[in-house]
Image (cartoon, rainbow, N blue to C red):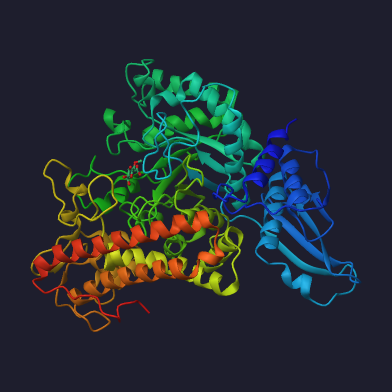
Amino acid sequence: MKYVLFYLSFLLCAVTAKANNGEHLWLDCHWSANPCQVVGPLKASPTIGIAAEELRQHWTLGPQVRLSLRSMLQLGEGYHITVRQIDSSKCPQLKATIVASSAAGLLYGAYQLLRLQNTGGLDSLLTSAPKDHGQSLFVMTEQPVWKLRMLNHWDNLDGSVERGYAGNSIWKWKQILGHELTPQLRRRLTIYARANASIGINATVLNNVNASPLILTRPYLEKVQAIAQLLRPYHIKVYLSVNFGTPKALGATSTADPLCPDVAMWWQRKAKEIYALIPDFGGFLVKANSEGQPGPGDYGRSHADGANMLANALKPFGGSVIWRSFVYGAHHKGEDRVKQAVSEFEPMDGLMADNVILQSKNGPLDFQPREPFAPIFYRMHHTPQMGELQITQEYLGQSKHLVYLAPMWKEFLSYVRPSMLVGIAGVANTGDTDNWCGHPFSQANWYAFGRLAWNPQLSAENIALEWSRQTFKLPTEQEQQLCHVMLSSHETCTDYMMPLGLHHIFRFDHHYGPEPGGFNPKYPLEWCPTYYHRADTLGLGFDRTVATGSGATAQYPPHYAALYEQLDSCPERYLLWFHHVAWTHRMLSGRTLWQELCHHYNSGVAQVAQYRSWWHNDMHPYIDNMRWQQVDTLLTRQLANAQEWRDSCLNYFSRFARKPIIRPSTHTIRQ
Ligand code: GCW
């Protein structure tokens, strides 16, 4: 009975595969005509049951897979895979063994084995000359680098999703509250769970960091319990975002002051209630004193006071508090916004309880198309930290533009070493739309996030290849072209939106289109594009040097501080982030800044035009009609948007540069 719904989802998957609306993501159905035999401790846990079922239905390269549980091996969530060639007389077949020391390890090993099969990773074994019977041919051992690999859903209880571009919340909060999930919801969430497990994601925060106090009321907690039960066999732990003012907002206390005993007691009782419903509950994610959210600062208390009070409530049950460093404008008004996280949190290093983790966005501002890494990762030596990446493309064309984010995340990971973090979170791009993510290529970002969270050493190239093989199954030439488009798409987007370190010149609020001249005295300065680009007749860019600017460069470790401080050594991709640069400044290319700016904008547009014509003219025969049509329409829109970005930014900046706009030539495509 336990697996009836699981089978049901496979069945539905089989029926709907032909239409290919993308619902099954990269786990498109590979059905084995003769289910293979899976041997091992299959009944030991539901998680192993799922691993076995996946293999039984989808492993097609041999008659048997063996699962083996050996706790002595201390593999954690990892696994050891061995694949041997058998039956050398006829066509070669493979026999696989997965050894792990936990049920989760077997589950992840099963998905890895299937990934190897589905991406051709075992093909050489099938085509190579038969070796001696039983000879071990393929061996791999893997363990995840981080123990927390988490999605953050910014889902609201009214069903909307903050910065969500793929429909409404997948959790259907408004649908019956309580223990039961509808069959349709179970079916969808099973696909979600399976997708996450297949890429190693082991935690999920169900609701928006701008959290409603209602999430901690009984009816919602019962629904959270039902979701947690569904996700548990897939080794996914549930967390909740909490509103720091909850006890006061719900009328249980007269204050939310973290040092008030009644408040602390309320949280302790709430933690007890939650753990009675969800014994493996992960903990709380908190956005406090940020963008209007309540926090300990409302009572003159520090972030450490607030975090520690919550940590104390969760501690007896093994839960953690994940506290966000995304705060600005509260205590350091007037200070360059990108400096404020360090100013606020560095003095608290070492003051937080050991079950508090500080979570910071990859860059010091806010998920811009390109940012230098956030220096806070180097400034907290006694506080566990997590990185926060944004999978939903709030500032990268949302679900309308084809932008593969792995190269951007790899750039971040080239500065921040994995050992500096205990985990990584990704702001999810999922919604209740059929294909989960809106743009068919946005699925690749969910996939890439999970793969990098498992192993940050993987290359953006390999991940693109894995994803495209599992998603489209193309001939080699088309596959290479598709991967080329994916891999160049982030640089392309940066080119047509904000090259050379420009940032935050988006239209107010929706963050989709350009508004370089945006300024409104009613808004905080830090929300206005003109605050960030500082264009004048002399030049362009935000001077963040110690010598003449805001001094943000000084927050970096000495090597980077020196690099970024000097105009000549600052990498050009971050130039206007750190420097106010003369329009006549000579760039590495020999062009002036103004010419270079025009070049990048033109190049970005030219690239999208190429993507579009390639897809339109060459790809139809290789892609199912539905997805081809979708992408074709979206690329047409992306091209129009890219042109709008270029025209509006260059028109605006030319007024300051007092130079004519250089129009596109045939040479503008980036090499
Ligand atoms: O980027 C900004 C977004 C807000 C978001 C905030 C945050 C959830 O525009 O919508 O709020 O960041 O990360 O808290």
405 lies left or right of 547: right
Residue 312 lies, with reference to residue 509, above or below; the image says above
Q: Which residue extends farthest bottom?
A: 590
Q: Is 588 in front, or is 591? A: 591
User: Which quadrant would the C terminus be assigned to in this image?
Assistant: bottom left
Which residue lies at the image location 43% right of the left edge and 44% below the top edge?
A: 166
Q: Is 99 in front, or is 321? A: 99
User: Which quadrant would the N terminus be assigned to in this image?
Assistant: top right
Residue 664 lies, with reference to residue 536, above or below; the image says below
State which image quarter holds ligand 1: top left
The image position of residue 632, as x and y in percent, is 42, 60
Q: Is residue 327 visible?
A: yes
The image position of residue 3, as x and y in percent, is 73, 35
254 lies left or right of 192: left
85 lies left or right of 81: right
The image position of residue 422, as x and y in percent, is 52, 50
The image position of residue 491, as x and y in percent, is 37, 67
Which residue lies at the image location 76% right of the left edge and 53% below the top edge?
A: 32
Q: Is 645 in front, or is 622? A: 622
Choose top left, top right, bottom left or bottom right for residue 267: top left
